[in-house]
Amino acid sequence: MNCEDPGFEANHDHDHCMESALSTAKELCRERKQRLTPVRELVLKLIWENHQPMGAYELLPALAAAGFNSAPPTIYRALEFLQEQGLVHRIASLNAFIGCPHPENPHRSGFLICSGCQRAVELDTAPVHKALSESASELGFQIAHETVEVVGLCADCQNQEAVDA
Amino acid sequence: MNCEDPGFEANHDHDHCMESALSTAKELCRERKQRLTPVRELVLKLIWENHQPMGAYELLPALAAAGFNSAPPTIYRALEFLQEQGLVHRIASLNAFIGCPHPENPHRSGFLICSGCQRAVELDTAPVHKALSESASELGFQIAHETVEVVGLCADCQNQEAVDA
DNA sequence: ATTGCCATGTTATACTATAACAAACCTAAT
DNA sequence: ATTAGGTTTGTTATAGTATAACATGGCAAT
Ligand SMILES: [Zn+2]
Ligand SMILES: [Zn+2]
Ligand SMILES: [Zn+2]
Ligand SMILES: [Zn+2]
């Protein structure tokens, strides 16, 4: 698999993920006449490299190592830009950020987060959105944004638990 | 309506909400042999009084006014206890806490949050959970906990917007 | 009364995020 | 090329959220 086909499979080509995500990002920003500056690109790269949700402050050392200013505003500005472009999502329950595998079409995001291996994969939120919008419309509530973050164990980590037990 | 029938209706009996929530809490803690100490009860009362999601630090002044220590650990300990007992929920996307209208049977929580009036109501999460668990089981993912927080406009605030426009 | 557990007080610190203003840098007219 | 205007980055400071660690006090079972 690659990162365009979300899942928890461990054995996939990380490098391909990252390169693909970066080249897609460059193309999108070019189309949209947005500037994927060096620091923004580096932050995106770092997020994809780690391939799991990353806190803002976890990214700072690598920024410093690359010669950029590593005060908090630097990283938060980059993250803000990347979020606006749909290149990364924020996971509220983790105070962390993760790369989006489908930035070309903006969408509602939702995540499955494994508490065993810390990996997170983006969900297809269509079914859950349908359920939510039905509940909301019963109350006359107009949805603007959804936070859907599910914590649990991925298949690998369930197996691991069984082995350990 | 009262708070056992969640909704965004403005004209309901706040005092009844609060008293009902507090007496339910007392009874539950007695049944469970848990101690609803003065500071814990006060925190619960403050949360219900405000009747909207409250940040931990917003509650501290009232604690100080009541003669309690008002250092952060005090409030976070009380909140932790109240969460364990299902008496309050944390809303991750707001870093805030709100009283649960149905603490007698522990449940998955989900919220509709109005960005106009800051009120939040608990959702019936059964339909959402059904959708989520189908998506999760396709990936062999075992759900432990769900964060479902929907931001938007309640009916009142939609009307208000229409008037203002 | 003694012991042990739970709850609270207290101080300090970690972690997360933004405000505010200055400097550098594009970019696109002139 | 010059200049003016907007955007990006640097820099310092601070706001906002949450927990660690250890001391003290209250309560209950023996
Ligand atoms: Zn996405
Ligand atoms: Zn896992
Ligand atoms: Zn609840
Ligand atoms: Zn409203």
Image (tube, coloured by chain):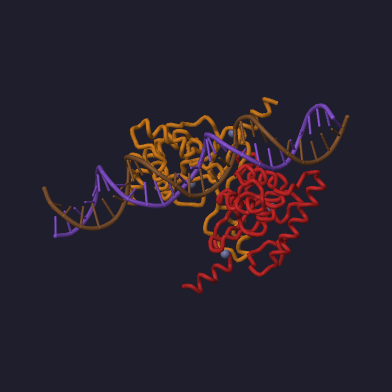
Chain colours: A orange, B red, C purple, D brown
Is B26 left, or right, of B14 in this rendering?
right
Q: Is residue D27 left or right of residue B12?
A: right
Specify the quadrant of the image occupied by residue B159.
bottom right
Q: Position of residue B160 (x, y in %)?
A: 53, 71
Q: Position of residue B51 (x, y in %)?
A: 64, 60
Residue A48 in view = yes
Q: Residue furthest bottom?
A: B163
Res. B148 visible in picture: no
Label tally: 0
Please say if B117 is above or below A43: below
Residue B147 lies left or right of residue A52; in this view the side is right
Choose between A74 and B30: the one closer to the eye: B30
Kindly identify the residue that appears in the image at 52 percent across and 59 percent down. A144
Q: Residue at x 60, y 40 (%)?
A: B139
- Of residues B58 and B128, the one nearer the viewer is B58
Q: Please give the name of the residue rendered at 58% of the width and 69% of the height, measured from the top-left corner.
A: B156
Residue A105 lies, in percent from the top left, at 44, 51
In the picture as drawn, the residue positioned furthest to the top comes out as A164
Choose between B55 and B140: the one closer to the eye: B55
Looking at the figure, which quarter contains the N terminus of chain B? bottom right
Residue A45 in percent (x, y) is at 40, 36
Picture quadrant where residue B141 is located = top right
